[in-house]
Image (cartoon, grey):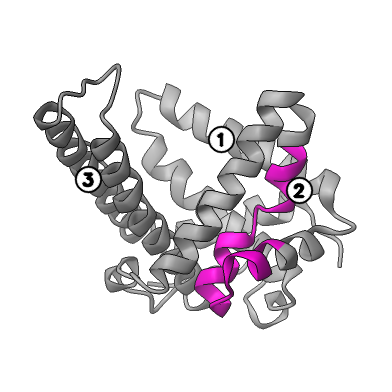
Amino acid sequence: MKFSPGDAIRFGWETFKGRPWFFIGAVAILLLASIAINIVSSAIDRATGGSLEEPSVAGSIVNYGLTVLLNMGAIAFFLAAYDSPDRVQFSALWHPQPYWKFLGTSLLASIAVAVGLFLLIVPGLIAMVLFMFSMFLVIDRGLGPIDALKESMEMTKGNRWPLFGFILLMALILIVGILALGVGLIVAAPIVGLAYTYAYRLLSGGAAQIQPADARIDV
C-alpha cells in the first residue's frame, strides 16, 4: 500500500477542523503536563546536586520515566481520535499500560537512532524511519519491544522514502508552529499527531475503516 504525505497532512487538517477547540485543549493538557514534569525533575536535580546544565542521574531518570507516560497518553489519544474523532474524550490521554513494554521500546528505538546519528548521521535517519511506528504498535497491539521494532520495519517497506519526507514535513510544520510565537504549536501539534496516526493506520491495514481525508466531522 502506497503512502502519501500530502494525504496524511490533509487528513490531519480536516479532522482538526471538525473539533478545533477540543484538539487544542488536548495539546494544552499535554503541554502543561510536560511543564509539570520539568518542574518535578528540576526539583529533584536541585535536591540531588544537579543543575539545568548538568542534570542529576535521579532527575534524568524521573524525567524520562514520566515523559514515557506522557508519550503513551499522546499516542493512545491520537489513536482514539483517529478512530472516533467525534467521540474521543480527554480521558483517552491517560493510558499507563503497558508501561514497561513501551519504556523498553522507547529506549531501544532511541538508542538505535542516537548511535546511528553519532556514527554517520545517515544510519540514524534510517533507524528513525524504520522504527517510527514501534511505539504505536505497543499501545495499539500490546507488542513487546523486539516484536514492535520488527513489525515497524516490516510496515515501512516500500514507503521508506515517502515516510522520510513525511518526517521532514512534520518537523517543518512543528517548527513553523513554534516560530509563530509558540501559539501555532497548539494547532500544528494535533494536525501532526493525527497525520502520523493516519500513516500508522494506513500501513497497518486499518485505514480502510477510517473516514477519507477530506471528510468533515461535525461537533
In this rendering, position of residue 148 left or right of residue 107: right
For the C terminus, which image quadrant? Answer: bottom left
Residue under pointer 1: 173
Q: N-terminal of the two: label 3 or label 1?
A: 3
Residue at 81 percent across and 65 percent down: it is 154
Q: Disc 2 marks which residue? A: 163
Q: Quadrant of residue 63?
A: top left
Q: Looking at the image, which is closer to me, 12 or 174?
A: 174
Earlier sequence position, callout 3 versus callout 2: 3
Please name whichever residue, 183 or 104, is drawn nearer the observer in this view of the structure: 104
- Return the residue nearer the eye: 195 or 72: 72
Disc 1, SS: helix
Kindly give the residue lying farthest to the bottom in the view shown. 209
Viewport quadrant of the N terminus:
bottom right
Q: Which residues are magenta?
A: 125-149
Q: Quadrant of residue 12?
A: bottom right
In the image, what residue type sits under mark 1? Ile
Residue in the picture at 22% in, 39% down: 35
Provide residue 212's location: percent of width, then percent of height: 67, 71
User: Any magenta on residue 2?
Assistant: no
**Between marks 2 and 1 in the image, the one whose residue lies nearer the viewer:** 2
Could you tell me residue 66's position as x and y percent?
29, 52
Disc 3 target residue: 32
